[in-house]
């Protein structure tokens, strides 16, 4: 049985192994980086059952990340409204610059995505 411990940028994978007294101890097997969820060669020692278990855990992490991104996207209109209200009422110059830069970069990327989608469809 595997134990997968969540860290900020990685998932640390342990195998539960009984010691000489029969007490379950954690044996570190490797890590899966959250940036790409690729299983590296250090995890080649997993049994087929453990590999399937880890694949299931990785699928759950990917689904959670997608759901989190979707929730952020669907809340974006409200968030923009709140941010603009804050900037208008309380924003300092450095905050305004930071937000303006983020919005400008976001619009540039959105235009690029839209242009690519148009060229793929047409």
Image (cartoon, grey):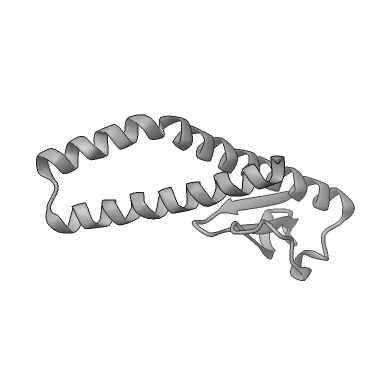
Question: Residue 81, position in %: x, y?
Answer: 28, 32
Residue 63 quadrant: top right
Question: Residue 31, position in %: x, y?
Answer: 65, 63
- Residue occupying image coordinates x 14% and y 47%: 91
**Residue most extreme to the front:** 122
Residue 78 quadrant: top left
User: Which of the image's four quarters has the C terminus?
Assistant: top right
Question: Residue 45, position in %: x, y?
Answer: 83, 65
**Residue most extreme to the right:** 48
* Depth order, front residue of 24/62: 62
- Residue occupying image coordinates x 62% and y 49%: 116
- Residue occupying image coordinates x 67% and y 50%: 3
Q: Is residue 16 above or below residue 59?
A: below
* Depth order, front residue of 26/84: 84
Q: Is residue 92 above or below residue 82?
A: below
- Residue occupying image coordinates x 77% and y 64%: 43
Left or right: 57 with respect to 79?
Answer: right
Question: Residue 37, position in %: x, y?
Answer: 67, 56
Left or right: 34 with respect to 81?
Answer: right
């Amino acid at each position: 049985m595997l134990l997968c411990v969540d860290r900020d940028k990685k998932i640390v994978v342990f195998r539960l192994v009984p010691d000489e007294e029969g007490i379950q101890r954690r044996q570190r097997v490797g890590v899966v980086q959250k940036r790409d969820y690729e299983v590296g060669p250090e995890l080649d020692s997993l049994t087929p059952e453990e590999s399937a278990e880890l694949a299931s855990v990785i699928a759950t992490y990917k689904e959670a990340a997608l759901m989190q991104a979707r929730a952020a996207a669907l809340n974006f209109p409200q968030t923009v409204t709140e941010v603009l209200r804050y900037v208008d009422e309380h924003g300092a110059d450095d905050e305004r610059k930071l937000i303006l830069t983020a919005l400008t970069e976001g619009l540039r990327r959105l235009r690029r995505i839209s242009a690519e989608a148009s060229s793929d469809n047409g």
